[in-house]
Image: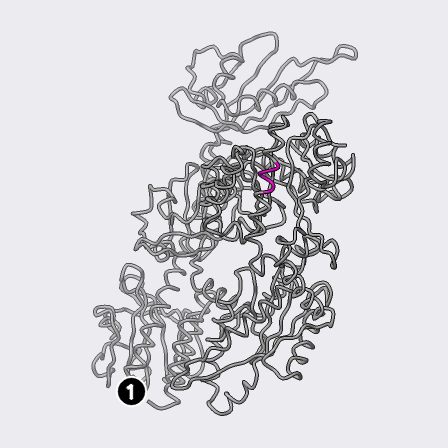
Amino acid sequence: MKDAQISRLKKLFELSLTLSGDPMEIFQHAAKLIGDLLEVKLVCLSEIQGERLNFLAVYMNGEIYENAGACLLASTPCATVEETKDIRVYDQVKELFPEAAFLQDHNAVAYCGFPSLDNHGKVVAITCLLDDKPHDFTNEDQEVLRIIGQRIGMEIERKRNLEEKERVSGVLRLNEDRLHQATRVSGTGVFEQTYGNDSIYCSTELRTHFGWDADERVTTQTFTASIYPDDRKRVIEAIRQAQHPSENGLLDIDYRIFRRNGEVGWLATRSQTFFDTDGEASRAVRTVGAVRDITKKKLSEQEQRIFATAFQTQEGIIVTDANQIIIRVNQAFTIITGYSAEEAIGNKPSMLKSGRHDSFFYHAMHKTLHSEGYWQGEIMDRHKNGRIYPKWLTITAVKDSDDKTTHYVGNFSDITERKRAEEHIHYLANFDWLTGLPNRTQLNDHLKYALSLAKRSNGHLALMFLDLDHFKDINDSLGHSVGDALLIKLAKRLRAALREEDTVTRLGGDEFILLLPGVDAIGAAHVAQKLQDALADSYRIEHHDLILTASIGIALYPEDGEDLEALSKSADAAMYRAKQEGRQCYRFFTQEMQACSARNLQLVNALRHALDRSQLHMHYQPQISMRDGRIIGAEALLRWLHPELGMVSPAEFIPVAEGSGLILPIGEWVLRCAVRQAKAWVNEGFGPLIMAVNLSAVQFRHPDLPELVTRILDEEGLPPKYLELELTESVAMHNPQSAIAVMNNLQERGVRMSIDDFGTGYSSLSYLKKFKVYKLKIDQSFVRDISTDPEDKAIVSAIINLAKSLGLKTIAEGVETEGQQAFLREQGCDETQGYLFSKPVSAEQFDALLKTGFAA
């Protein structure tokens, strides 16, 4: 096929998809474009009306004509198009159909006619193309004309629908006018009531409205009993106000009644109350009024509201009554859902439920509908064939004049393709296209969150720049496809070497950024070496065995920056320093960080001998009951006094112990000392007294922990109920399922568990319910400013209420002022500990506190 022909057909195909607007304009536009693109003399788009063809749009010699006449269908080749419901092409057409006058008039030689069908398969329009010379209508031309024919068929139906809508609207207006005339001339009831006489005069028409007998005595009670219950209070109040002397006596009200035959009718009453003035006082003496039956008018208004609401959209439409029973759907509904109108009508929209939404979703939807009369949102539904698809749904409540809902109208569209496009755009906006790693946008978001946690808890985080050494040589020698495959494998290794909460981002080319929340200089050095080791193994790409090394720069928060830009600059500078110093290494941004690494090595070596040289000591901080102020427990705290280093902070040496593996023997020693001391206090008559011991992440994840705890308790003779093991929130949530199993094991052995530093981690309420804990410890970072900080007040209050709802106790640490204690007591906190009562003290000093029974 020639390029020009291909272009022509493409334009014709696009025509079938893009035509929009008024149907007559579409018909004219279609006729002109077909004539221009297929280069024929005449195009006639005709609608079939009975046995005739009405020429809706005629294109001839570059001009377009609207409603250009009509002819009998039977005398034209168009009759064969209607009969076959397919395209018909004729050469020497005027000889074949000599009775067709328009063929003779235009000296037609070539003819091509194609049909347009409605949704029932009936031919509703025929478009014919004429030329006064032979014309080759190719198969490709015919296929595109068939598609255009389908579109014309849709527009014919839309045209007829618009005409039918106008006709129906005209009929409704005419009926309403006739009803108005009839009620005005002969159907208006009249009544008169004289106060002091209980009987009400009612005309024959009025008695007919209510169904009262001709000789029946009508009283105020008779009238009131006939009013529809939902309208009764409103009508009585309106009558009372009209009869008040301060009003003008005019009553104009619509209301419903129960007729004697049980039917519900609508009446409109307009009345005037007359008053008798005696001096300054006035009283109602008589009311005269007219009553019209407006039942038909109300029903007509209701139908018009339904019609106006439901068919103002070309999307899928579903109309229900007030009980959500489907009473009407449109053709788009069938196309989108797969259900025909017959299958849908009489059912509820719940037939489309996908099962993807819970009862709370639908409850919220119905609540909004009830309060606002409108709901709009995305919802997942199920097609008749079982396919789940997303749709955008708008539901509007149709209300009557009393603001009561009578129907619901839903407009919806299938947004599957839009969702796919959005997901793809979201992926490209947040992930690296090659490796699938998060991009800088996600890194920035993750860093903001990590920084907020670090600032609150005075914590740390590390940012690393990782740049591959001599990666350009691989691209230049082996090609970019090998380089890309290598980067993909490298990204997988980097991800596998990090924790779940860490973020690795490809900055571009062979540069990567790694975000490590909660990691200090010691941890950063450990991770950097781990990454170097992970990169060292060879990579098999196609038939090549490749080796990679990397230079890593490390920046730490807050020392080297407090935002992504500052930390990035620091890490980038450190990475270039690593490049300058020989590559295949890591460097910290500052000399102080290098000194910290040296300090870490010094602490590790010293800590290896701390137990043997009796440098570790136990201190105990009392835990106080908020109910009576007495000591009910103690938290065991480890202290390290080194002959050269002096008093080393637990915040410094505990992470070193964990990183070096020394935490296990040290932790066992701490647990044994604490249990032994608790047993001594029990023997001295200080009980019941709970001993709280902190568990590190390494201890908690050790498979022998439950057996170790039981063995120490048995050897020291302390009942399990006097031991409480504290576990930080972050450790518990690292592997919730494993944590649940360990907690269950310890709980079955009689040992209590509590969650330390609650509120600083990533707790899931669903898991918190499953943890076998009996107490939550509120982190001191929240307690510190509860006297002045509204946010901390709200957080502490929420934690206490959450614990109560789960049947757990709460203890607040770091209580230092009377104001803090007063707020905690007001919120219902169970226990406290802190310098307000006592700092951590030796066992001997703690004995003195126990003898007083309360904190000094």
| Quarter holding residue 93 | bottom left
Q: Name the residue under label 1.
A: 136
- On whether residue 674 falls in the magenta region, the answer is yes
Q: Position of residue 302 (x, y in %)?
A: 47, 39
Q: Looking at the picture, does residue 681 appear above or below residue 705?
A: above
User: Considering depth in this image, is 315 or 121 the residue closer to the camera?
Assistant: 315
Residue 173 visible somewhere in the drawing: no
Q: Looking at the picture, does residue 146 appear above or below residue 658?
A: below
Q: Position of residue 386 (x, y in %)?
A: 32, 54
Q: Where is residue 327 in the image (x, y as percent from the top left)?
A: 37, 43
| Quarter holding residue 828 | top right
Q: Which quadrant holds the C terminus?
A: top right
Q: Is mark 1 on a helix, strand or loop?
A: loop
**Label 1 neighbourhood size at 10 Å, few (<14), some (14-19), many (20+)?**
few
Q: Position of residue 747 (x, y in %)?
A: 48, 38
Q: Looking at the picture, does residue 817 appear above or below residue 38?
A: above
Q: Which quadrant holds the N terminus?
A: bottom left
Secondary structure of the magenta portion, mostly?
A: helix
* Type of amino acid at the residue the image marks with label 1: Asp
Number of residue marks: 1
Seen as rendered, the residue at the extreme front is: 613
- On whether residue 235 falls in the magenta region, the answer is no
The magenta span reads 673-677
User: Considering depth in this image, is 256 or 621 the residue closer to the camera?
Assistant: 621
Q: How is the image coloured?
A: one colour
The structure residue drawn at horizontal position 66% and vertical position 80%, both measured from the top left corner, is: 576
Q: Looking at the picture, does residue 783 appear above or below residue 391?
A: above
Residue 264 visible somewhere in the drawing: yes
The structure residue drawn at horizontal position 53% and vertical position 89%, both measured from the top left corner, is: 473
User: Considering depth in this image, is 359 or 259 the residue closer to the camera?
Assistant: 359
Left or right of 851 on screen, residue 256: left
